Image (cartoon, rainbow, N blue to C red):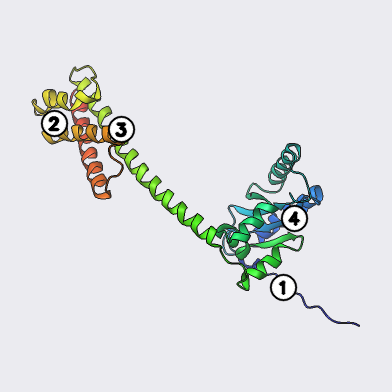
């Protein structure tokens, strides 16, 4: 019995420039010559420039077979050298991301957004009949994020917010040290030896404010920065508002500028 099998055409090639396709296809061809049994798929994906623009970075995903092949140190080292040499030979515009098949499958299984974007936008240059079928399943809505993936990403957001608060506190400490350095410079300019940080505000008032070289508010600001950095360093303060940080930033800039005038006036 004879019958016709109509295969679906692969999509997404129109997303990429001719140069991106040409360079990535050449890389895939050369890689396959040297590591045919090791490579499961080579995919053009992600931020590769579109047709109307010249490519800067061409993202290529290589999925390697760690199911049937033992990923020993020697094999991994040889593969890395192979990729480096091919990139140097073909084009340094190529940016190669390598994933083990088991890792890629796990990302797809739980609906990881990065893996799903690779499927959504990728064009398979080489495929051992798994990448394109997964693309079809995604297009048909049969691959969905699991509750595990949802909560994993949500918890990352909490961690990132915490990191943002930490960086803001560290920025306050940076403001403090900017004030310390500028104050030391101004005090040395008027003949004072550098003192320990806790005494800087008092010395600014004694030597500079009393001589009408500096506004009293700047000496008070220096003391405020000292107290804040102590609270942050000891853990007594765990957050600071955006409005407060902006006010500290502006006041510190003005203080450093005023102290610069003192330094310049004593040359």
Between label 1 and label 2, give the one nearer the viewer. 1
Instruction: State if disc 3 and disc 2 touch (CB < 8 Å).
Output: no
Q: Is residue 141 visible?
A: yes
Between label 1 and label 4, give the one nearer the viewer. 4
Q: Earlier in the sequence, mark 3 or mark 1?
A: 1
Between label 4 and label 3, give the one nearer the viewer. 3
Q: Earlier in the sequence, mark 1 or mark 4?
A: 1
Q: Position of residue 227 (x, y in %)?
A: 22, 33
Q: CA distance from mark 2 to mark 3?
A: 31 Å
Query: How many residues crowd around disc 2 within 10 Å: few (fewer than 14), some, or many (20 or more)?
Result: some
Q: Earlier in the sequence, mark 2 or mark 3?
A: 2
State which quarter of the image contains the C terminus. top left
Q: How many marks?
A: 4
Instruction: State if disc 2 and disc 1 touch (CB < 8 Å).
Output: no
Q: Is residue 197 left or right of residue 89?
A: left
Q: Which residue is mark 4?
A: 40
Query: How many residues crowd around disc 4 within 10 Å: few (fewer than 14), some, or many (20 or more)?
Result: many
Q: CA distance from mark 3 to mark 1?
A: 63 Å
Q: Which residue is mark 1?
A: 9
């Amino acid at each position: 019995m004879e019958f016709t099998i109509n295969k679906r055409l692969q999509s997404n090639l129109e997303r990429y420039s001719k140069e991106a396709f040409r360079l990535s296809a050449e890389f895939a061809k050369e890689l396959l010559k040297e590591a045919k049994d090791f490579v499961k798929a080579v995919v053009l994906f992600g931020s590769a420039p579109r047709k109307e623009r010249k490519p800067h970075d061409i993202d290529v995903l290589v999925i390697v077979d760690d199911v049937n092949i033992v990923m020993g140190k020697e094999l991994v080292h040889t593969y890395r050298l192979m990729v480096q040499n091919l990139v140097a030979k073909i084009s340094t515009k190529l940016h190669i991301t390598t994933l083990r098949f088991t890792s890629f499958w796990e990302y797809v299984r739980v609906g990881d957004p990065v893996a799903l974007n690779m499927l959504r936008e990728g064009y398979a240059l080489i495929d051992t009949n798994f990448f394109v079928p997964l693309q079809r399943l995604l297009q048909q809505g049969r691959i969905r994020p699991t509750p595990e993936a949802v909560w994993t990403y949500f918890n990352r957001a909490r961690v990132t917010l915490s990191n943002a608060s930490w960086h803001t506190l560290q920025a306050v400490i940076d403001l403090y040290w900017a004030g310390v350095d500028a104050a030391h410079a101004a005090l040395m300019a008027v003949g004072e030896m550098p003192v320990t940080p806790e005494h800087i505000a008092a010395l600014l008032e004694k030597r500079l404010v009393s001589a009408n070289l500096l506004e009293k508010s700047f000496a008070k600001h220096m003391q405020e920065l000292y107290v804040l950095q102590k609270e942050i360093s000891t853990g007594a303060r765990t957050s600071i508002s955006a409005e407060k940080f902006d006010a500290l930033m502006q006041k510190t800039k003005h203080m450093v500028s005023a102290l610069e005038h003192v330094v310049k006036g004593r040359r």
